[in-house]
Amino acid sequence: MLVLGIESSCDETACAIVKEGNIILSNIISSQVDIHEKYGGVVPELACRRHIDLILPVIDEALEKANVKLEEIDVIASTQGPGLIGALLIGLTTAKGIALALKKPFIGVNHIEAHLYAAIMSSQEKMSFPCLGVILSGGHTNLVWIKDIGDYEPIGKTIDDAIGEAFDKAAKMLGLPYPGGPEIERIAKQGDPLAYSFKAGQMKEQPLNFSFSGLKTALLYALQKEPQPIDEKTKQNLAASFQRAAFEDVIKKTEIACKHYNVQTILMGGGVTNSRTLRTLFQEKLGQDYTFIWPSEGLSLDNAAMIAGLGYHRYRRNLKGDSLSLEPLTRIPF
Ligand code: KG4
Ligand code: ZN
């Protein structure tokens, strides 16, 4: 079965062709970083205009790279949400149009669930459930108890900024370009992670929830206390200490969740899991006791292969598509 997946929830216009749910024939991602970077974040109106320009060429490229004709596609899947409303509408409407023209089923996919599916797609092993899902992206920070694919219980989330968003804002304070996560990781390599005693937020009553806004403010105050303009070493120390505090927090809460829910396997997903530093720290701290499943190359950041993969799974399970009147959703409770 060949699934064409479309992703357009934020600032990537992406299309992928996936065979039997995990054989990626093509995975085309057209990033819009160039137009958003001067604003230090995504400008929704600009993102929508760029999606309109790119969506058809990106689909053509994905078909060409996969050496597949549009008529050979069996199912068309697209991100239903969460995301920017205009951006979602472009991908979803295009997918519905193709499905209608080809008389093939259409599936609307939850983007956050797809980030977890990216790890499942990447794994050679057969998955055993229940397990824990950890989603760390620009828009989401979630801990999820996964009883089976499609059967999730949210157990922790951020009460303010998402972790990737906090990295992007921290980078902006340090005068680094957007997206900030990779930039912080790059300069943190030369910095001292213990130079500043930063800590992410803890909620006594909600030990599995996250808060990164206080950490961001702590960075700002520490930065303002330094002689201006700050020198390169100070910048590296601030970046390294910020990164350490954010990752320590995620690792600690993941461990609490694993113990509480008695799971052995952890599925990791979302753009922040692209960080080698994060992967090494998780592996060092928890690798002895738990099995980690990470998204493979090209599947951490937003992509359409994970949308096609989850679309395949959903179609196989229900053997029918979604209604063509399915609406995009900016928020989906998870
Ligand atoms: O999953 P994603 O592509 O988009 C959303 O669904 O939000 O994640 C993008 C986020 C950005 O905030 C980016 O700064 C962050 O992932 N990110 C990183 C790293 N690489 C990407 N954060 C920390 N360290 C990294 N190496
Ligand atoms: Zn994402």
Image (cartoon, rainbow, N blue to C red):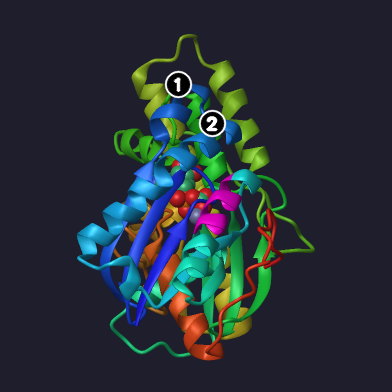
State the residue at coordinates (38%, 41%). Answer: 31
Number of the label disc, if any, that sits on residue 328? none
Which quarter of the picture shows residue 82?
A: bottom right
- Residue 144 lies in magenta, yes or no? no
- Farthest residue to the top: give it: 228
Look at the picture and state if 307 lies above or below 10.
below
Q: Amino acid at mark 2?
A: Leu
- Residue 92 lies in magenta, yes or no? yes
Residue that label 2 marks: 46
- Farthest residue to the right: give it: 205
Residue that label 1 marks: 175
Task: Say which of 64 and 242 sits in front.
Answer: 64
Q: Which residues are magenta?
A: 87-94
Q: Quadrant of the C terminus?
A: bottom right
Label 2, secondary structure: give it.
helix
Please give left or right for residue 333 compared with residue 300 in the image.
Answer: right
The nearer-to-camera label among 2 and 1 is 2
